[in-house]
Amino acid sequence: MKPSILVIGGGVIGVTTAYWLDKLGAKVTILEQSDTLADGASFANGGQLSYSFTDALANPALLKRLPSILLGLDPAIRIRPTLDPELIRWSIRFLRNCTSAKADQITLKLLEYTARSASLMQEFASLCDSGFDHRAAGKLVLLHHNDVPQASRISRIKQQQGFDVEVISSDEARKIEPALETWTEPFDAAVWARNDESGDSNKFVAALGEQLGKRDVSISLGQTIHSLLEDDGRLTGVLTNGHIHNADAVVVCAGNGSRSLCATVGLRLPVYPMTGYSLTFPVGRIPLQRSVTLSRRKVVLTRLGDRIRIAGFLDIGVKRAQPRIDQLRKLALEVAPTVADFSASGSHWTGNRPMTPDGLPLIGKTSIPGLYLNTGQGMLGWTVAAATGAKTARIVMQDFGVEET
Ligand SMILES: Cc1cc2nc3c(=O)[nH]c(=O)nc-3n(C[C@H](O)[C@H](O)[C@H](O)COP(=O)(O)OP(=O)(O)OC[C@H]3O[C@@H](n4cnc5c(N)ncnc54)[C@H](O)[C@@H]3O)c2cc1C
């Protein structure tokens, strides 16, 4: 008999998890609170499949920026201090990770996931007929001269892990991406990641959802899970609006909803929302061929078919989105005026990254038999989704005696 498994959450993490679980022989149901898939952080993110840029957010350089961040003077990162005990606990853990040694460890661990994702993404690209504006054109991370020694050191570590990354001069970067000639962003060098890719995670979720429907996976929308149900120390199912859904196992892939959901059975997850914003416009006069990251500004520019996605900023507790969206638009217009048709009617979006204090996802078994996690992918959820879904499915199915072939 196939084990029946509930996947909570229909974002990029939920659908990839469901895909691998189905492949390993489970009877899978996705329960999603919204009326569409990918309505959370997977809706309009930066679109970068950032296989080689896994650098930990918690690092000594960020620590140096902390005074200006706390004074509200940092344009890229805003924190509105509150007395929320969850945020205080999260922040203490985050700050403990801001050492060079920890940052390297985290970067290396994330590289394991991204290397696996890069190869698994080929399977998804052919399954979905690349119908998510998938593009394998590489990425440039623009650097100021102060950033070059650290970027060179990290690039050497990544090269040792088999990643094709190198620090190049600004002239070389302009040859690789001619659109940079018309930009006003000053930069002295760049990291060139040849094998990084991009794609629209929203379209990907829709395309994969369609494929899942053709298999035996059921997708149930408009289902808010109010609590997880436990009996005799084992997870037995979930409670929606007056309905109990029983299952042999439950996998929580609920992004920022994971913390409150797991709290219903006494589990405390260190997942906190970190807000970002994006703009989408038709491509401009000089379209971008590669993805580009403005590292200090925490902004990415990505070509998605005939559109440009501009995404960025890291905010905690900031209530008003519109001023940040206006700021992002102003910045893009100043820095890269030719990249998009800013006169056309574009769209804007606010999303919350489900962040853990170390930037590593929470994957696998919990202390409650039958309850599994695949959440907290933070800044890199789209990039690592293929790998974390596969890993989670393997762990779950091992408990039902299924080994991956
Ligand atoms: C501005 C911005 C830019 C980004 N850029 C990139 C990028 O370039 N590359 C990259 O790799 N990553 C990027 N990310 C991160 C990435 O978008 C996320 O890590 C990823 O989308 C997380 O996916 P998820 O499925 O865990 O969460 P979500 O997409 O939020 O999905 C979780 C789902 O669970 C559902 N849910 C929650 N609670 C419940 C409940 N109680 N009952 C039922 N359903 C529930 C929600 O409705 C939601 O649909 C970016 C994020 C932001 C905000």
Image: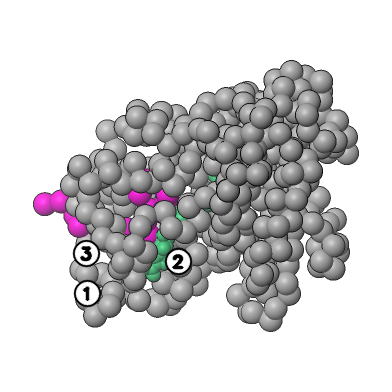
Whether residue 106 is visible, yes or no, is no
Q: Determine whether the beta carbon of the residue marked 2 sits less than 8 angstroms from the nearest atom of ligand 1.
A: yes
Give the secondary structure at mark 2: helix
| Amino acid found under the numbered disc labelled 2 | Ser
231 shown above or below 279: below
Give the secondary structure at mark 1: strand
Which residue shows up at 53% across the image and 33% down it? 306
Residue 244, percent from left and from top: 22, 74
Q: Counting residues from the N terminus, which is met first, the one under dot 3 or under dot 2? A: 3
Q: Name the residue under label 3.
A: 247
Tell whether position 74 is magenta: no
Identify the image's colour scheme: rainbow, by chain, secondary structure or one colour.
Answer: one colour
Q: Name the residue under label 1.
A: 244
Give the secondary structure at mark 3: loop
**Magenta-tinted stretch:** 1-16
Find out whether the residues at labels 3 and 2 contact each other: C-beta distance under 8 Å.
no
Q: Name the residue under label 2.
A: 258
| Amino acid found under the numbered disc labelled 1 | Ile
Quadrant housing the C terminus: top left
